[in-house]
Image: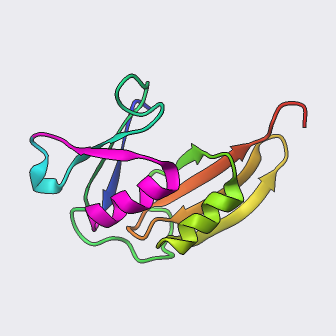
């Protein structure tokens, strides 16, 4: 996956959510003003990373909260799944799947971001455990 995009209703609110949850920063993309397009920068994303990402204003209404998955589900590695999940719920996110252990894989959770997207969080199992 060389590039991903997140479609949101309120770009500024979504940037606050993802910046706080995953430590991302955003830069307006020249030529993308009409749709509020911003490039995402974080370790491994943008710049020298193998992955690039963007955020833009959603064209049309967001799916209703609790609706079935409505696009790609992106899962990001975190050091503490429970802590990041709690942060997401306290900052505008909603439960999609609470933190759950998957033997040999890690502890995973899914949250809605308040903009019609579901994202996954995973704290992978450490080798030897």
Is residue 18 highlighted in magenta?
yes
Provide residue 53's location: percent of width, then percent of height: 35, 40
- Residue located at (36% from left, 31% from top): 46
- Report whether residue 93 is seen: yes
> Is 73 rendered above or below residue 99?
above
- Between residues 65 and 114, which one lies in front from this camera angle? 114
Give 59 or 126, whichever is nearer the viewer: 126
> In what quadrant of the picture does the N terminus appear?
top left
- For the question of whether residue 71 can be seen, the reply is no
Q: Is residue 87 above or below residue 2?
A: below
Which residue extends farthest right? 129
Determine the image quadrant of residue 51. Answer: top left
Q: Residue at x 62, y 63 (%)?
A: 85
Q: Please report the bounds of the magenta region as a residue range.
A: 9-30
State the image coordinates of residue 126 (x, y, percent, origin top left).
81, 36
Residue visible at 21% across and 62% down in the picture:
59
* Residue 51 to residue 88: above or below: above
Residue 60: x and y, percent?
22, 68
Which of these two is toward me, 119 or 26? 26
State left or right for residue 13 relative to residue 129.
Answer: left
Residue at image position (83%, 40%) is 104
| Residue 45 in the image, given as x and y percentages of width and height | 42, 34
């Amino acid at each position: 996956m060389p590039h991903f995009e997140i479609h949101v209703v309120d770009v500024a609110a979504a940037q606050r959510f993802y910046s706080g949850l995953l430590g991302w920063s955003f830069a307006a993309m020249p030529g993308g003003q009409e749709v509020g397009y911003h490039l995402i920068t974080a370790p491994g994303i943008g710049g020298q990373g193998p992955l690039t990402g963007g955020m833009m204003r959603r064209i049309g209404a967001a799916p209703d909260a609790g609706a079935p998955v409505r696009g790609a589900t992106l899962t990001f590695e975190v050091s503490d799944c429970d802590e990041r999940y709690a942060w997401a719920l306290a900052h505008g996110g909603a439960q999609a799947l609470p933190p759950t252990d998957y033997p040999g894989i890690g502890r995973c959770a899914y949250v809605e971001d308040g903009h019609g997207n579901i994202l996954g969080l995973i704290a992978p199992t450490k080798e030897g455990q």
